[in-house]
Amino acid sequence: MRRISNNPEETRLIGSEIIRDTPTVTVLSLIGDLGSGKTEFVKGLALGLGIDAEVTSPTFTIIHEYRGGRYPLFHMDFYRLLEERELEEIGFDGYLRAGGICAIEWGDKFPSRLPRDAIKVSFRMNDDDTREIAW
């Protein structure tokens, strides 16, 4: 499925719509260049889950946990990770088993560590400043 987003609000709306029919335990691998809309999409996931917290990029903290919605949301960013062994240091497998939604920016960095049923969501910036989001 593909959608075009014209602005951050539409990107958040797409995220909130996708999460409505998503099972409890889901891994979303978010793939796209810097500035392509991955964090805005996760803001939409949080809205769709009923999470009231402010969602920010976990680029420097690696993981942000959001609770208080239908399911917990674990927002991860692999951008700064250099080696697969670092996933052990952040407790990655525990998050996969925690019974929530894992949204992983730069999820294509360590694809062999993702579950087979992970949903790949790609973000592409178009020349007209729109974003194409495909899953």
Image (cartoon, rainbow, N blue to C red):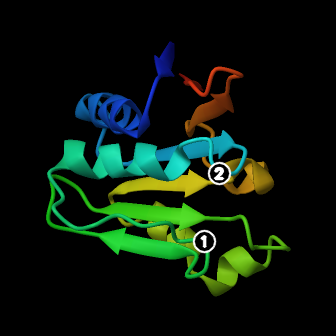
Q: Quadrant of residue 31?
A: top right
- Residue 81 position within the rendered picture, expressed as x and y whole percent measured from the top left: 76, 73
What residue do we see at 22% from left, 55% from top?
71
Whichever of labels 1 and 2 marks the residue nearer the N terminus, that label is 1
Which-is-in-front pick, marks 1 and 2?
Answer: 1
| Secondary structure type for disc 2 | loop
Q: With 118 as the anchor, is 9 left or right in this view?
A: left
Is residue 42 positioned above or below 51 on the image? Answer: above
The residue that label 1 is drawn on is 59
Q: Residue furthest right?
A: 83
Amino acid type of disc 2? Leu
From the viewer's side, name the closer residue of 88 and 18. 18
Q: With 116 as the anchor, is 86 left or right in this view?
A: right
From the viewer's side, name the closer residue of 112 and 68. 68
Residue 104 — which label?
none
- Disc 1 versus disc 2: distance between alpha carbons? 19 Å
Q: Residue furthest bottom?
A: 89
Q: With 60 as the anchor, is 42 left or right in this view?
A: left
Is residue 107 positioned above or below 129 on the image? Answer: below
- Residue 39 position within the rendered picture, expressed as x and y whole percent measured from the top left: 48, 53
The residue that label 2 is drawn on is 114
Which quarter of the rendered picture does the C terminus lie within? top right
What residue do we see at 66% from left, 86% from top?
89
Task: Tell me, yes or no, whether the two marked residues, 1 and 2, touch with CB atoms within 8 Å.
Answer: no
| Secondary structure type for disc 1 | loop
Amino acid type of disc 1? Thr
